[in-house]
Amino acid sequence: MGQLPVDVRASLRFFAFYLANGTIDVDLLDGIDYRPALFQFGSPLEQVFAIYGNVLQVDASGQVLNEAEAQYRAAQWIRSYCDPGYQVEPPFRAWETELHGP
């Protein structure tokens, strides 16, 4: 098996940068410093990456098709984790939050 396509690797790199920098969807997460909540324990951060990876779509040539949507869905989960009063719309479907692997 080969490597992930360059476009996918770049998308993941930017997502990780924005996440660590506190700038994932600044409109949705305005005023919420989610980093301490996510980085203290691994499971919340793991869920954020699972959602991003599950929602991300790639075409046959390896080009990312919906980077903004994948980031937004991950940001919605972050917001709901940090703000219990926030309602995710539309609600997450099971495949979006599924954790893969051993």
Image: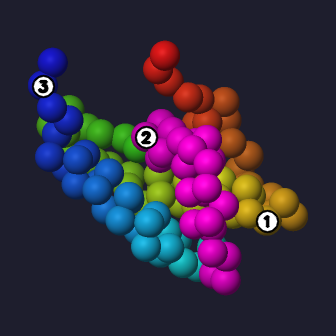
The boundaries of the magenta stretch are: 30-54
Disc ID at residue 56: none
Asked if residue 77 is positioned above or below residue 100 in the image, the reply reads: below
Locate residue 55 relative to residue 66 in the image: left or right. Answer: right
Task: Give the image location of residue 69, x and y in percent.
Answer: 48, 56
Residue 14 visible in the snapshot: yes
Lower sequence index among marks 3 and 2: 3
Determine the CA span between mark 1 and mark 2. 23 Å
- Is 60 inside the magenta-drawn segment? no
Q: Is residue 73 visible?
A: no
For disc 3, the marked residue is 2
Foreground residue, 79 or 27?
Answer: 79
- The mark nearer the N terminus, 1 or 3, is 3
Left or right for 17, reference 87: left
> Mark 2 is on which residue type?
Gly
Q: Residues within 10 Å of mark 1 (few under 14, many from 20)?
A: few
User: What distance separates the C-alpha of mark 1 from that of mark 3?
Assistant: 40 Å
Element type where label 3 sits in the image: loop
**Amino acid identity at mark 3:** Gly
Within 10 Å of the Cα at label 2, are there few (<14), some (14-19), or many (20+) other Cα atoms? many
Q: Residue at x 61, y 55 (%)?
A: 40
Residues at marks 3 and 2, CA–CA distance in whole angstroms: 18 Å
User: What residue is shown with label 2?
Assistant: 53
Q: Residue at x 74, y 63 (%)?
A: 82
On residue 83, the disc is 1
Circle 2 SS class? helix
| Main SS class of the magenta portion in the image | helix
